[in-house]
Image: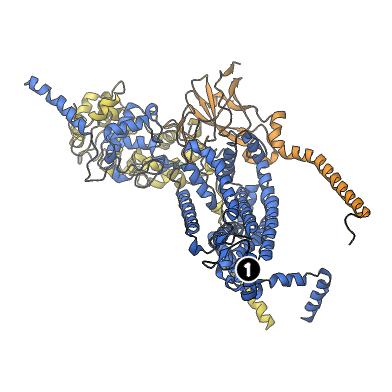
Amino acid sequence: MRLVQQLGEWFDERLQLGRTLREVMEHPVPRQTASWWYVFGSAALTIFVFQIATGILLALVYVPSGAEAWNSLQTLNQQIAFGWFIRALHGWGSNFMLAVVLIHMAQVFLFGAYKFPRELTWIAGVFLLLMTLGMAFTGQIMRFDQDAYWGLGIGASIASRVPVFGPALVNLMLGGPIIAGATLSRFFALHVFVIPGLLIAFVGLHLLLVLKLGVNEWPMPGRIVRRATYEREYHELIQRDGAPFVPYAVWKDIFFSGFILLCIAACALLLGPFGPSGQPDPTIIQTAPRPDAFFLWIYTLLSYLPPAAETPIMLIGPVIGILVLLALPFVAGEGEKSWRRRPIAVLTILLIAVALGTMTQLGEHTPWSPVMDAWSSDPIPTEYLKGRTPLEHQGALVFQAKQCHNCHSLANDGGKRGPALDSVALRLTNDQLIRQVIQGGGNMPAYGKNLSAAETTALVKFLETLHPPGQEPARDASRGVAVGAIEEQPSPKQR
Amino acid sequence: MTSPESPDLSRRGFLAKLGLLFNVGVVATLSAPILAYVLSPASRKSNAGYESWVPLGSLDHFPSGQTRFATYRNPVVHPWDGETADIPCWVRNVDGKKFQVFAINCMHLGCPVRWFPQSNLFMCPCHGGAYYKDGSRAAGPPERGLFEYPNKIEGGTLLIHAGEMPTPVSRACNKSELVVIDS
Amino acid sequence: MRHSILFLLSLALAIEVSGCNSAPGKPGPESKVLPPDKILNFDSLYQQNCAGCHGAQGSGGAAIGLNSQVYLAIADDATIRRVTAEGVPGTAMPAFVQSSGGMLTDQQINAIVTGIRTRWSKSNPTDFAPPSYAALTPGDPKRGAEAYATYCSSCHGNEGRGGSRAGSIVDQSYLSLVTDQYLRTIVIVGRPEIGHPDWRGDVAGKPMSQQDVSDVVAWLSAQRPKIPNQLSSSANSSEGGTK
């Protein structure tokens, strides 16, 4: 023990860091902030360090080459002892980091911590969020599989819509004319050097600001932030009711960080690594690309935007979003901090959370995507075929063979792009069915040229059988009258 | 402390500024090659060119009236590109003489469209874009038809002018007359 | 004391290492995704490409059941291979082999053909002798009408216009969508799972003869329209309401 102390003294004599470190550790924090609400920032930092460590471990094996990356991931998964586990830790760490960063941000927003004088801390935080998202996106590219390949295609398609510079931007992003080895190399550089370097710098700035300006005090309803008086009031609060960070508050941070790491390890152990899916071979077109969980909401958004508004919203939306975040501390730099007196802030957070959650949930199910092999893999339920005429059976075959099933579901199987057809006969009459099949419309292609008259007849006959037993199918009342009139007219002449 | 006005310090200050200026000059000189290096993927297009005529194979592979899958090796390629440089496309033999070659990429967000000969439609698995057999838009979010590569026939081989990933803003498909050179 | 701590630590490490090796998250060899053209597993291939029309277990779909002893007895491997690879023009059966515009390789077609045979062919072919897959002699429409009256009219009604138990089989649209071979196969094999008997069951104890089948098919084929009928009339006509 004595030896350790001597060694420490020897180093401190030369480094002279001991006093600074002690000051940092013992900087006074308001007593009430030693709370479980104040642990998310330190947890994000812990995960970041953890991600650096696991990332370095992966880099020992990973090959950032278009031709080899996928194979090296397979080697990690299959051959190297615990390679799969390190991949899983890094992948789950990424998800947890984003989640913790978002929670941290919501907490800071709700507690008014971005207000004077902590504007710059908030701005650094906004950039940290963007970089974390950048790490998640580039990390998804590192898992160089089909999802990564077509995800890059989606990125390129969005970049191409930038006015004037679009095509050049696409080439810059891809590092050449197509998605290939050069693309992976530059995304590797971004993921491993550029963004982590920036992250470290901004984390440093963020932490420095937290130390210089002090931890945001627990917001009290009615305690108003004013530029003129805030710093004096905070100083008085610290004098009156402060406590050293170590050990007064730190133990909660330590326990929560450990808990988060344990959660990551448990997820990695139980759920395993993400992918990789199929090889990044563009000639394999039997694929349905999906982004990772944290980008699913964008995928949903892109499918629901009206085509005309899509390009402007895709290009201007993110800029506006970032500007709003950056402007927040300047627009609302003073005033009430407590969320109890800021209903709009609370509603904003709730709205964003519900919107993102809903869109992510939709992105999991992708009801707008056709199911590309439903026509050949999802059978029509046998009860829909029993007791039907031979023509109706042929209609069922037309339904399958013409890929109707890819967009329309029967008994919940098949695509959800178009309406489910289990009870279509209740909604559409014979004439309306024929018109819809032939002319399409309402986001359905016109099948007029692609169906023979017999095929259309058979298909419509089959569709007319699709109604629940006991409910009469829709029929055109005027047709009955007209047909009746024709039948009645000749009858007197015959007599 | 000597005041900043002292002649010695102002001379030193001037030298420091001169040194800074010198470094700015060095960096400016260096920045030209660095910028050229960084921007090379976007600028090389005008020099060597990304696109050239690539063969898709013998005409026998593309029966008249049908649309078939074809792949080619991208003309600009590195050994470490691996399978990513094998690019797929759809070849439609219109009537035995006229050909249409469509890019695989949906013109919404670039996902791979699949051809269904039964319903004569191209469908996209991502957001449900659909195209008719001539590549025109049928349904879904795309704002335009499929990208079409210029093509020609030489010595019984179908060639297309390709080499760059088509994006929604790639120039509209070449509708001009087809170059047919009989062997 | 120190030794026991070391021992406990190493024990924990050993448990962790061995536990992790059988962790539920560990990807197995099957996690490596095969390119779609390398899949030769019959179940995946059948599920992906055939189940939509022929039913999840080879029966109960909109098309003829492949899990049918009669079908497997009359159709040889070459026939199943040809139909799978190149499809049947004029019907809903598409071509699946790449050289005909499909997505499957020759090996995958073979895997499907052998899979259908080994998975579902159970009975001894000598147990019963169904009529042959292809017609041996040309059928006669006149005799076909009589054979129809004997074997089929109890369900499909007078002259095939539909009866109480089954729909019309002389509907012009229906006949335009099926080939003679399709008619022949369905007469022989039937659709037992949705109520259509095979060639033995039409009249109890009196199976149709080779010639009966050919004749009925010829009779049906003779009623097929030369020019595909117009949409508007046929769409409403098959119920017989506006005739």
User: Residue A444 vs residue A98: left or right?
Assistant: left
Residue A113, image x, y percentages:
59, 62
Question: In this rendering, is residue C222 above or below A26?
Answer: above
Residue A31, image x, y percentages:
60, 74
Chain A: drawing colour? blue
Residue C28: which quarter of the image? bottom right
> From this viewpoint, is residue A184 visible?
yes
Which residue is identified by label 1?
Answer: A234
Residue sitting at the far top: B182
Residue drawn 48% across and 26% down? B134
Residue C215: which quarter of the image? top left
Identify the amino acid type marked 1.
Answer: Tyr
Q: Residue A295 versus residue A279: which sits nearer the camera?
A: A295
Q: Chain of mark 1?
A: A
Q: Looking at the colours in the rendered structure, which chain would you say is drawn in yellow?
A: C
Q: Looking at the colours in the rendered structure, which chain would you say is drawn in orange?
A: B
Residue sitting at the far left: A495
Question: In this rendering, is residue A468 above or below A168?
Answer: below
Residue density around tag 1, few if under 14, some if 14–19, many if 20 or more, within 10 Å: some
Q: Residue C219 versus residue B178: which sits nearer the camera?
A: B178
Tell me the quadrant of the picture where the C terminus of chain C can be found.
top left
Residue B5, image x, y percentages:
89, 54
Q: Residue A338 versus residue B128: which sits nearer the camera?
A: A338
Q: Residue B59 versus residue A192: which sits nearer the camera?
A: A192
> From this viewpoint, is residue C184 visible?
no
Disc 1 on helix, strand or loop?
A: helix
Question: In this rendering, is residue A479 above or below A71?
Answer: above
Residue A409, image x, y percentages:
37, 43
